[in-house]
Amino acid sequence: MRRKLPNRRRSESRRVVWQSPLNPSAAEQTIYISIGFFEDGLTPREVFYDSGYRTGSDLETLASDVCICLSIFLQHDGVSMDDFTKSLARELNLRTGKAEFASLVGVFIAELLKPPAWAAQVLAAQEQEDQV
């Protein structure tokens, strides 16, 4: 079942810097995405690719399609984000020695798991409502 999003909702634009974990000499790639949140202001329900790859390139199309697939996933019930992330490929970063997501799918999901900049304010307002 799809969770319909309100017509107006909070969103946050983010700058994501990614470097392939398997190629120590890979250049950093800066990608911009926007995340739309559900009515609670904290739960991500959509992600849009904004820019970062050359216009018209295969990578731009891939990044955009990944965001569309993730948005569809986020708006439907049945699979939790934790279960989904456990299934994604991880690789040992040859620069840092730490395991991390191996592809843009994981990189975008890592951004979805981060709370928005206003999370503390929303939680404080919820606490005040609970006390009333």
Image: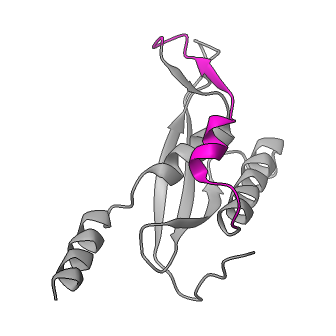
Quarter of the picture holding the C terminus: bottom left
Measuring 29% from the left and 73% from the top, which residue is drawn there?
122
Relative image position of residue 40 (x, y in whole percent): 43, 76
Q: Which residues are magenta?
A: 77-97
Relative image position of residue 110 (x, y in whole percent): 52, 44
Where is residue 69, by image quadrant? bottom right
Question: Is residue 132 shown above or below 67?
Answer: below
Measuring 47% from the left and 55% from the top, which residue is drawn there?
14
Measuring 79% from the left and 47% from the top, which residue is drawn there?
62
Relative image position of residue 44 (x, y in whole percent): 53, 64
* Nearest to the observer: residue 87 or residue 41: 87
Quarter of the picture holding the N terminus: bottom right
Please state if 121 lies on the left or on the right of 112 as rendered.
left
User: How many marks on residues?
Assistant: 0
Question: Is residue 68 shown above or below 81?
Answer: below
Question: Is residue 41 shown above or below 91?
Answer: below
99 magenta-colored: no
